[in-house]
Amino acid sequence: MDKETKQMFELILNKLDTMDNRQDTMDKNLDTMDKNLETMGKRQDEMYSLQKAFEENVKVTRAEQDKMMHMVADIQGKVTRLTSEVEDHESIIKQIRAIK
């Protein structure tokens, strides 16, 4: 082989080595990105689970609030009835005192 051909082959081999090195670097970067993507997927799954738990908690809280509203309405009705009965009794007591 002549000198020029040898230099050309060496240049081609050097270029191929450089391309191999760049390809290796790109493969490593791609592996890193894959790991990051897996991590983000896991985090997304965790956040989805938390969101579902929060939604369930909201439903339970609303149900408890509705139950308490019914209880308060029941108590209010009883207090109103008792107030009316007390007023009736006071009226009767005044009439009895007026007789004495």
Image: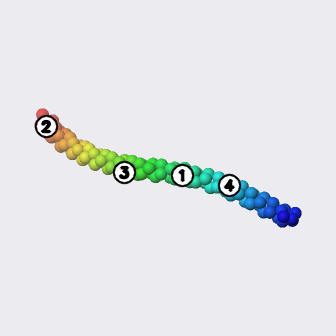
**Disc ID at residue 24:** 4
Determine whether the residue tagged by mark 4 lies in a helix, strand or loop: helix
Quarter containing the C terminus: top left
Residues at discs 1 and 2 in contact (Cβ within 8 Å): no
Looking at the image, which residue is at 47% across and 51% down?
45
Looking at the image, which residue is at 38% across and 50% down?
56
**Alpha carbons under labels 3 and 1: distance apart:** 32 Å
**Disc ID at residue 96:** 2
**Alpha carbons under labels 3 and 4: distance apart:** 53 Å
Determine whether the residue tagged by mark 1 lies in a helix, strand or loop: helix
| Percent coordinates x, y for residue 80 in the rendering | 24, 46
Q: Callout 2 environment at 10 Å: few (<14), some (14 to 19), or many (20+)?
A: few
Disc on the earlier residue, 3 or 2: 3
**Disc ID at residue 38:** 1
Disc on the earlier residue, 2 or 4: 4
Q: Residue farthest to the left?
A: 99
Which of discs 2 and 4 lies nearer the camera? The answer is: 4
Disc on the earlier residue, 1 or 2: 1
Position of residue 100 in the picture relative to residue 9 (left or right): left
